[in-house]
Amino acid sequence: MCLSELDQEKTVAPALTVYFYRPSSDSISFAAASQVHRDSLSQVLVHFYPLAGRLHFIAATSSAKIEDFRDFALPNELRSLVPVVSYDASDLHELPLLMVQLTELSCGGISLGIGVSNIMVDGTCASHFMDEWARMARGDPIGNQPFLDRSVLLTADPTLPPRFKHERFVPNPLLIGQSDDHEEHNKETKIVMLHLSKEQVQKLKDIANKTRPAYIPRPFSQFEAVAGHMWRCATMARGHHPMQPTKLFIPVSIRGRMPLPKWYFGNAIMKQAACSHSGELVKQPLPYACGKMREAVEIVTEDYVKSALDDTKRQPDLTPFRTSHTIGSTTGCFDGNPNMEIISWLGIPFEGLDFGWGKCVYVGPATINVDG
């Protein structure tokens, strides 16, 4: 399977997602639902065949009810609803690229746990695959064929030197006074679900744009306003020294920024870094943080992407730059204190997925293992 540089820099561990469905009014049995999932999965994988190798499909039952998961912020409970594979001990060539677990809950509801290799897809591709799978489960034909040729993102030979500075391969700043990130990396992580109302999001957006600098003509988005607010709040809560360097990593899609087939199936996300000092970030109003994010995003042009791909190919080993998802791991990139990464699913149509017995009532990540 040809992998582009954007695929190569991703971790081999899977992205774990869980969907919840309330009991169906059609009184479909779990056995029937499981068979529909198996049959439609076999059909959709004809079109998405790169995911078909080493497939794992599990049907399970649980004494839990949907209500037991409350605000869906309890990773240990959600973790039981997705397939489990040890990515530390297994041979790379034996690791599944796609894992599916369908679980019958005691309330009559169903959970669908999905694990897809981060090397194979980004969020847009995962959403495309899930949408087409659901279409086939409902008896409809495929809507949009995936474009599977990843060679369109391969760099040319000989590889050119980078034409821009790429923060992606600059070591993350450490806390002042520390020589490594091991202490921060090994701290226990707590997960909290924070709810923002439509009015609160609009208020943050208004604050961000009320004193927006004149050199930034386009208004800040919801994501920029909320992410900038979170970056400032985390910096305050962490009690940084004013001269503490800090980075905020944000994913930037290259779709629309360079010629790429619309239904390209592969990673098309670049990890960009907004940079500041903690003292300046806290002292300045919200538009300052949003502006730093805007700078990191707007530099991503077709020429910048090509330079970044060349820079990736020139790295002798990408292991230090792959985000680490395992507590206690000594390899990979740690994006926690004094840094952070914020990902938005607002533009990805995960919600409402319907396999024929109603739309899902919740979709979200099944695990978050480390700070950042």
Image (cartoon, helix red, strand yellow):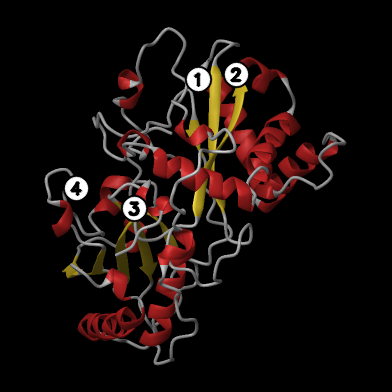
**Residue 272 falls in image quadrant:** top right
Q: Secondary structure at mark 2?
A: helix
The residue singled out by tag 4 in the image is: 87
Q: Nearer the viewer, mark 2 or mark 1?
A: 2
Of mark 4 and mark 1, the one earlier in the sequence is 4
Q: What amino acid is labelled 1 in the image? A: Arg
SS at circle 3: loop
Distance between the Cα atoms at labels 2 and 3? 31 Å
Distance of label 3 from label 1 (alpha carbons): 26 Å
What count of labels does the image hold? 4
Q: Residues within 10 Å of mark 2 (few under 14, many from 20)?
A: many
- Contact? badges 4 and 1 (CB < 8 Å): no
* 4 or 1: mark nearer the eye: 4
Q: Is residue 184 left or right of residue 260?
A: left
Q: CA distance from mark 4 to mark 1?
A: 32 Å
Residue 40 locus on image (x, y percent): 31, 84
Q: Which residue is mark 2?
A: 278
**Residue at point 73% right, 48% down?**
202
Q: Nearer the viewer, mark 2 or mark 4?
A: 4
In whole angstroms, how far apart are the C-alphas of marks 3 and 4?
16 Å
- Residue 156 can be seen, yes or no: yes
Q: On the image, which quarter does residue 133 sit in?
A: bottom left
Q: Which residue is mark 1?
A: 238
Q: Real-space Cα distance between discs 2 and 4?
A: 36 Å
| SS label for mark 4 | loop
Q: Secondary structure at mark 1?
A: helix
Residue at position x 46%, y 67% from top? 127
Within-10-Å neighbours for mark 4: few <14, some 14–19, many 20+: some
The residue labelled by disc 3 is 366
